[in-house]
């Protein structure tokens, strides 16, 4: 057996190097934590940086000083051509996320004197297409989903209150899970969303019907679900503790599937529907922006493209190429549409 020490692998050496990508990535995530970024953001940023660091180590790049603009462009192409285990490419949003965290990381390195210049300063992010929400329910379809829970059971009553709250307020999944008992103001009919997206608090109204279901849940169901010590959250699981995001998505998704509408979706489906139906009802888009907690109005404007009901009414009333009815039809006779003019 040789007396020489074994040479550390590239990953091990990088972890020990205080000026290496790994060590500095850890310091960057710690800076984000001290700056009060959300825990979910910290977890995602660390994971996405790990993908890049592994890719660099495979090419014997261990320090930020060795990263060039050309290398980052190569990584960008790698993400574009990369295929997952199922053969599918990375979505444009995933590619953009992986590159965005690099831009923040290298900007932080320059600000903290770990680099003289930022190789990612001119790194262009992929253009993300603006897709419409895939599924939007009609009012009747929403009511069909809401009628799904078995109200004789405490969990069924809780689920009805959850569905009504999502439909009334458009809260995100994590925002609903984070609601505390003290965040519900029954007299003012409001909910206080603490540290929503971007760690911003906001107050949202809750409708009378949704509030009635929440009050019924609090009086008839929640006492049978809570388990000491009291967690203080508004909606609890069958173990008496806070709901988990995946479980909430499963529960809501099951009611959507159980309604047999031929449509799928979960918590975000109610968020989309709240915004779309309120816009069709005449609500100003800036009020919708405030309800949803969007920082930019452009994020909310996607719902103006979904809200087509009013546009159809205006189109039918004003477009000249519409069916004309005869006098007999107007008096109650059979419909007799005019033949189109011969344009041949």
Image (cartoon, rainbow, N blue to C red):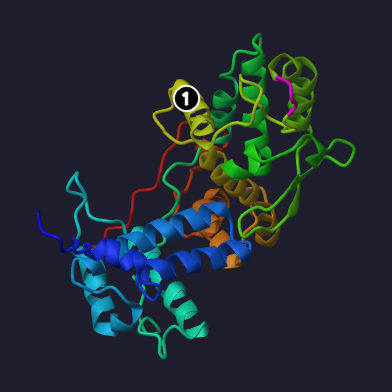
Q: Give the range drawn in magenta.
A: 226-230
Q: Mark 1 points at which residue?
A: 254
Q: Provide residue 173's location: percent of width, then percent of height.
A: 57, 41
Q: Provide residue 105's location: percent of width, then percent of height.
A: 44, 73
Q: Residue reaching furthest top?
A: 152
Identify the residue shown where x is 60% and y is 13%: 150
Secondary-structure class at tag 1:
helix
Position of residue 67 in the picture relative to residue 135 (left or right): left
- Residue 257 lies in magenta, yes or no? no
Identify the residue shown where x is 75% and y is 40%: 206
Identify the residue shown where x is 66% and y is 27%: 236
Tell me if residue 183 comes above or below residue 93 in the rendering.
Answer: above
From the viewer's side, name the closer residue of 224 and 150.
Answer: 224
From the viewer's side, name the closer residue of 145 and 230.
Answer: 230
Identify the residue shown where x is 17% and y is 48%: 87
Q: Residue reaching furthest left?
A: 1
- Residue 229 lies in magenta, yes or no? yes
The answer, for residue 316, to whether it is visible in the render is no
Position of residue 43 in the picture relative to residue 32 (left or right): left
Position of residue 237 in the picture relative to residue 116 (left or right): right
Q: Provide residue 282's location: percent of width, then percent of height.
A: 68, 52
């Amino acid at each position: 057996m040789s007396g020489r020490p074994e040479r550390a692998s590239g990953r091990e050496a990088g972890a020990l190097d205080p000026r290496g990508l790994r060590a500095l990535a850890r310091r960057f995530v710690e800076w984000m934590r001290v700056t009060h970024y959300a825990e979910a953001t910290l977890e995602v940023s660390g994971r996405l940086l790990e993908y890049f660091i592994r890719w660099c180590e495979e090419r014997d790049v261990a320090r930020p000083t060795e990263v060039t603009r050309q290398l980052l462009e190569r990584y960008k192409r790698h993400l574009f051509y990369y295929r997952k285990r199922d053969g599918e490419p990375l979505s444009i949003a995933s590619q953009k996320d992986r590159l965005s965290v690099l831009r923040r990381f290298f900007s932080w390195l320059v600000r903290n004197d770990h680099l003289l210049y930022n190789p990612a300063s001119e790194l262009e992010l992929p253009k993300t297409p603006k897709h419409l929400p895939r599924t939007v329910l009609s009012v009747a379809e929403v009511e069909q989903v809401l009628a799904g829970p078995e109200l004789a059971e405490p969990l069924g009553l809780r689920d009805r209150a959850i569905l009504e709250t999502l439909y009334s307020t458009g809260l995100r999944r994590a925002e609903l899970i984070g609601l505390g008992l003290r965040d519900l103001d029954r007299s003012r009919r409001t909910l206080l969303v603490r540290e929503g997206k971007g760690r911003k608090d906001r107050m949202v109204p809750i409708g009378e019907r949704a509030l009635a279901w929440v009050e019924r849940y609090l009086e008839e169901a929640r006492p049978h679900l809570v388990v000491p010590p009291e967690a203080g959250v508004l909606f609890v699981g069958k173990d008496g503790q806070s709901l988990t995001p995946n479980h909430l998505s499963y529960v809501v998704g099951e009611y959507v599937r159980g309604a047999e509408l031929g449509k799928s979706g979960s918590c975000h489906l109610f968020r989309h529907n709240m915004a779309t139906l309120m816009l069709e009802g005449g609500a100003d888009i800036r009020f919708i922006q405030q309800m949803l907690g969007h920082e930019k109005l452009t994020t909310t404007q996607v719902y103006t493209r979904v809200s087509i009901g009013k546009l159809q009414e205006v189109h039918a009333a004003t477009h000249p190429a519409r069916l004309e009815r005869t006098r007999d039809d107007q008096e109650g006779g059979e419909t007799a549409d005019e033949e189109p003019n011969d344009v041949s």
